């Protein structure tokens, strides 16, 4: 299991794989690369920027993003 850095702001969990990212664009690139479904990057960016700390955004049952 990967540990977050102090500068990380987002935690993704896709099919059991946990990753941490600092920037929204990194999260979007990772989600688009690792998921088998189409992602609306504009909508995802808007939702991620609106997340409060510790809030979780679920894209699907096997893909979630948390603000850390």
Image: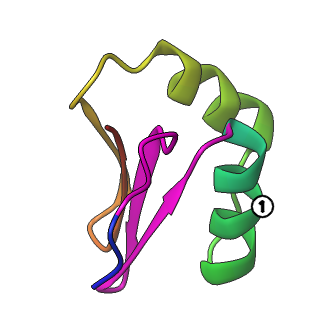
- In the foreground, 8 or 58: 8
* Residue sitting at x 31%, y 74%: 62
Q: Would you say 14 lies left or right of 56 here?
A: right
Identify the residue under disc 1.
29
Query: How many tags in the picture?
Result: 1
Q: Position of residue 56 (x, y in %)?
A: 26, 39
Q: Is residue 42 left or right of residue 51?
A: right
Q: Position of residue 8 (x, y in %)?
A: 49, 45
Indicate the secondary structure of the residue bearing disc 1: helix
Residue 36 visible in rendering:
no
Q: Quadrant of the N terminus?
A: bottom left
Q: How many residues crowd around disc 1 within 10 Å: few (fewer than 14), some, or many (20 or more)?
A: few
Q: Is residue 27 above or below residue 47?
A: below
At horizontal 36% and vertical 85% (from top left) the residue drawn is: 15
**On the picture, is 38 further left or further right than 4?**
right
Q: Residue at x 57, y 19 (%)?
A: 49
**What's the image's color scheme?**
rainbow
The image quarter containing residue 43 is: top right
Residue 51 lies, with reference to residue 35, above or below; the image says above
Q: Is residue 61 visible?
A: yes
User: Would residue 12 be counted in the magenta stretch?
Assistant: yes
In this view, the residue in front, 22 or 56, is 22
Query: Is 25 contained in the magenta span?
Result: no
Check the picture and name the quadrant holding the C terminus: top left
x, y percent for residue 38: 71, 64
Residue under the image location 60 percent in, 44 percent down: 22
* Magenta segment boundaries in residue numbering: 4-23
Residue extending farthest to the front is 6
Above-or-below relation of 21 to 43: below
Percent position of residue 6, x then y: 42, 43
């Amino acid at each position: 299991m990967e540990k977050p850095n102090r500068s990380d702001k987002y935690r993704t969990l896709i099919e059991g794989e946990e990753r941490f990212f600092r920037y929204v664009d990194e999260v979007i690139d990772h989600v688009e690369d690792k998921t088998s479904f189409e992602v609306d990057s504009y909508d995802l960016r808007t939702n991620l920027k609106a997340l409060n700390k510790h809030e979780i955004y679920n894209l699907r049952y096997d893909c979630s993003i948390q603000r850390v």
